[in-house]
Image (cartoon, coloured by chain):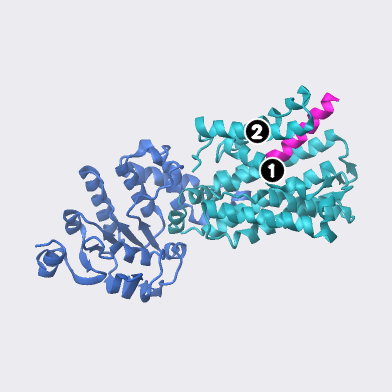
Amino acid sequence: MMKIKKLTKHFGGIKAVNDCSFIVKKNTITALIGPNGAGKSTVFNLISGIIKENSGQIIFNGKDITHLSPEKVSNSGISRLFQQTRLFNNLTVRENLLLALDNEDTKFWKNLFSRDKTIKEKLKKIKEMLKLIEMGEFENELTRNLSYGQKRLIELIRTILNPHQFLILDEPVAGVNPKLRKNINKILINLKNQGETILLIEHDMNFTLNIADVIIVLEKGKVIAEGTPKDIRINPKVLEIYLGE
Amino acid sequence: MIEAYFIHLLILLGIYLILAFSLQLTIGFTGLLNLGHIAFYAIGAYASALLTLNGFPFLIGLTVAGIITMLFGFLLSIPTKKLKGDYFALATLGFSFVIYAVALNWTSLTKGSLGLSGIPKPTILGFSFSSNLSFFILTSIIVIFSYVVIKRIISSPFGRVLEATRDDELAVKVLGKNTFKMKSVSLMISAFFAGIAGSLYAHYITYIDPSSFTMLQLIPILSIVIIGGLASLKGTIIATIILVLLSEPLRFIGFPSSIVGPMRQIIYALILLLILIYKPKGFYGKVELE
């Protein structure tokens, strides 16, 4: 589904991503792990078109998306969750989620002369998703009034509602309490069972080893190991570099 | 006499409302600190005045003024594509200085500081809007039109994207929206209505010169947007009424006009200061001023 080929990104003299190559197979949950500064978030920024590479290629569904802008990457079917919460704080939960569903309905002239005919359908979908994360009563709340964990959940739901074939999630459970963590785990497993493909970054090793089908370990911008959670658990290189054992 | 003065005030109120609604669209709803609004107002006034002085009917002058100004809005959106906050404000401020300099120095077209006089009062399908009452009706219709259009825009999914862009542009891009296009359209619509307001002003006063379109004229409109509250049309209406009418009693106290002008600026500055200290969001603002 996605091929990262010899991707390199320098920031001045620092090689954040260095000749990095890996493949994400369809209908899998792949986790990208590594110590702080390993280049995980930079890889995500390169995939989402936020920063441009120095060399290398990103192939998604057979198409080269390396030079696409963030909105074109999104429209090609990749939906991203950021490491830091990026909700629209002056809008309500409902408005934040509608923004993910509005893709075809934001044309100026269409908006000026006709009403949004799909609004009922969208609101139904939003209610269902909010029920799933037990946040139905917050639909009309401004997102700036929510707690960190609640914001994280709303943003995750927004990422899922954004039309996609591939999800990239940067630390989806960071700062989230154990109960919500279980909910997120359940949601991601459900998505995979429905045929979705997910690439995630997560520092919580228990969460990652439980949920991932494949784990890719990055160190200094390079892939140093790749395999199933079982393989990674006993990989001496990983234990030495990542876990410090 | 009092009645004629009152109608005159209502006409000015209407022109200010159109200017404030359209500025609210860019500043309050899109998060673009547009200090070039007064330049759009000037372009609309000059375009309409020049066309009607050359024999074109008022309706053509009004429409073309809106369209030309909209095109300038589009042109301004290209170099300012990647600018935000203070940088966008500075670029648009520069634009307003350029337009002012053009109005002052392109004397073969604008007559420079002499200004354009004898701008005809509007006539539509043989009906003349030469009396203040009929001009007030015309202004009211355009005020309602601008309110309805802007309200419609901000209540739609398109408006939602504008507001999201104000809050976090990168997050909007990652949701697959072309923010440049959206911001361009917002600036164009805002410019269109400022141009229409300029046309109304030119045909109401029947004389324009560059001094009608300086930063001093922008301050009251900007104050209205901030005092009314960012992203609130209701607040904009209330603030316009207060700011336009508040300084009027000064005329009746008997101060000479050389004092009334500066007093008005002092009142605007005082209200603005008090609002920023005690009510940073303005009357009905959704967003706090950063």
Check disc 1: other Cα within 10 Å, few if <14, some if 14-19, many if 20+. few
Q: How many marks?
A: 2
Any magenta on residue B30? no
**Is there any visible trace of residue B3 in the rendered image?**
yes
Q: What's the chain of the residue with tag 2? A: B
Check disc 2: other Cα within 10 Å, few if <14, some if 14-19, many if 20+. few
What residue does disc 1 label? B216
Q: Is residue B154 left or right of residue A187?
A: right
The residue at 85%/51% (across/down) is B114
Q: Are marks 2 and 1 on the same chain?
A: yes
- Residue B25, percent across and down? 60, 46
Any magenta on residue B6? yes
Q: Amino acid at mark 2?
A: Ile
Which residue is outermost to the top? B253
The secondary structure that most of the magenta stretch takes on is helix
Q: Looking at the rendering, which quadrant does residue B78 occupy?
A: bottom right
Q: CA distance from mark 2 to mark 1?
A: 12 Å
- Residue B222, percent across and down? 62, 42
* Colour assignment, chain B: cyan
* Colour assignment, chain A: blue
Give above or below for A227 relative to A86.
below
Quarter containing the N terminus of chain B: top right
Q: Secondary structure at mark 2?
A: helix
What residue does disc 2 label? B266
Task: Point out the stretch of residues depicted in magenta.
Answer: B1-19
- Residue A63, percent across and down? 40, 74
Q: What's the chain of the residue with tag 1? A: B
Q: Earlier in the sequence, mark 2 or mark 1?
A: 1
- Residue A167, percent across and down? 33, 60
Q: Is residue B36 left or right of residue B231?
A: right
The residue at 26%/62% (across/down) is A37
The residue at 55%/41% (across/down) is B231
